[in-house]
Amino acid sequence: MTKYARPVILAVDDDPSSIGHISTELERRYDRDYQIVYSTSPSDALAQLGSLRESGDRVALVLAAQWMPDLTGAELLGRVCELHRSAKRVLLIGWGDWGDEPTADAMREAMALGRIDYYTLKPWKSPDEFFHRTMTEFLHEWSRADATVPQEVTVVANPWLPRAHEIRTEVHALVERAHAVFTPPGPPDLSRMERTFTILGEDVAISVGLALLSYRKGWDLDAVSTPMVTAIGDMVTLPALFLAAFIPRNDAVNAVVAAGCTVVVLVALVAAVRSRRDVRRTLVEMIAVIAVFPLLDIFAGALLEARRPSLEAVPAILILLPPFVSQAGALGGILSARLSSKLQLGVITPRGMPEPPAVVDGAIVVGFGLPVFTLIGIAAVALANLTGLADGAGVLHPDAGAIVAGTVLAGLIVLPILLVAGYYVAVVTSRFGLDPDNQGVPIITSLMDLVGVAAVLFAMGVSGVTIHG
């Protein structure tokens, strides 16, 4: 049974004077429609949020000051989504805190990592209309996302016309179905969704399963999904291609499989075209991307084929190429996805030059990318030696340090291109109103396949690992 009859606004600040001023402002303006709760301890606030979750209470808004004992405000707000996913999270700062470098860095990092929805200034006068304008905007956003809040639908028509009654009936049915879908008594039935998606292909089922797991654990899906899905896709695709190579050996099986695949594709296309408008738009956007950008992968394959003799002489390069281009695409996809999310939330704007939160995301990608590329080079050399492929090549194996150095050099070439492409793909999709989920990852991964292959070939030649030719 719920503890409060109204949605909860929770404010947290260890400064008694400040929390008193904040709670007074909130109570004067919102006490009629919201339950105002406050705390001077981050640990106590987390305990209160856990208790509210157990009692089934709805939390609309959590406000937290940054510098507090035990937990900072950003850390506290980052854990709110584990307990109340729909709650809006706002970091409270004082006047002039943007000029304090540690506070400004903490704010930028919190926004870049998705720990907060935004920040606002603490109220400093009464009434503080600037503070209340921000609070009203967040409460409005929360109420629109909360399915338990009634949404008004007005049918404008002559009440005596039969068509007016038909429209009213149709709208009522739509609202009822939407209410049934979007008004859960608790968290969504994820186990039912998992069972439903077992009928899908393996790679799609894994992608959906990963999304559900991220939802349950409160992970940032932008940072988790792309590297996992691309790696799993590579692992599933290569064996599938190997098995598919046996199909053409039997003419009858080949014809049956080809006809079946053709029928499935045509049925899916017809169903998509006859479906809702948003589905048709998604189909058009995906076809445009999938039809054009795989050409970059073909060019990458042509580059490899042209250098095949020199690559076969150094098996370590053949070992490191797939993970190198895969991780380059994954890092670019992560960057594009995170920037697209920030553009959608209004944290950054689609400008020609990146804003601080976008710069932070780029720095994170570079910070992860260089160690990852170094480890790929080391692992490729070790695997080539352990498996005996280096000796079996029948040539003098290049120095291991040169291969690792070539891999790092290739990473240094790829990373700037990755940053520029990731940022401007997100900006262009935002400006043209395109769905970034249909554009960012396929464009970036295809581009990184070509750029990654070219960078590795160039870097290995410069490092003396391969012979130019």
Image (cartoon, rainbow, N blue to C red):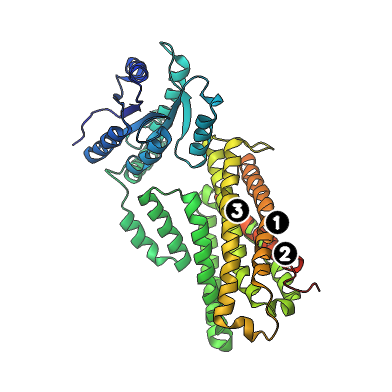
* Mark-to-mark CA distance, 2 and 3: 20 Å
**Residue 271: percent from left, percent from top:** 50, 59
Secondary element under disc 2, as helix, strand or loop, is helix
| Left or right: 449, with 173 as reference point | right
The quarter of the image holding the N terminus is top left
Query: In the rendered structure, are the residues bearing label 1 and label 2 in contact, judged by CB atoms less than 8 Å apart?
Result: yes
Front residue of 419 and 368: 368
Image height of 87 relative to 465, above or below: above
Q: Quadrant of residue 289?
A: bottom right
Q: Which mark is residue 413?
A: 1
Residue 165 visible in the picture: no
Please say if 79 is above or below 305: above
Q: Earlier in the sequence, mark 2 or mark 3?
A: 3
Q: Residues within 10 Å of mark 3 (few under 14, many from 20)?
A: many
Q: Which residue does the numbered mark 3 point to in the structure image?
A: 332
**Residue in the picture at 56% in, 75% down:** 383
- Does residue 264 show up? yes
Q: Which quarter of the picture shows residue 32?
A: top left
What amino acid is found at the position of numbered circle 1 in the picture?
A: Ile
Element on which disc 1 rests: helix
Relative image position of residue 123 (x, y in whole percent): 43, 17
Per the rendering, the mark at residue 459 is: 2
**Sequence order check, earlier mark of 3 and 1:** 3
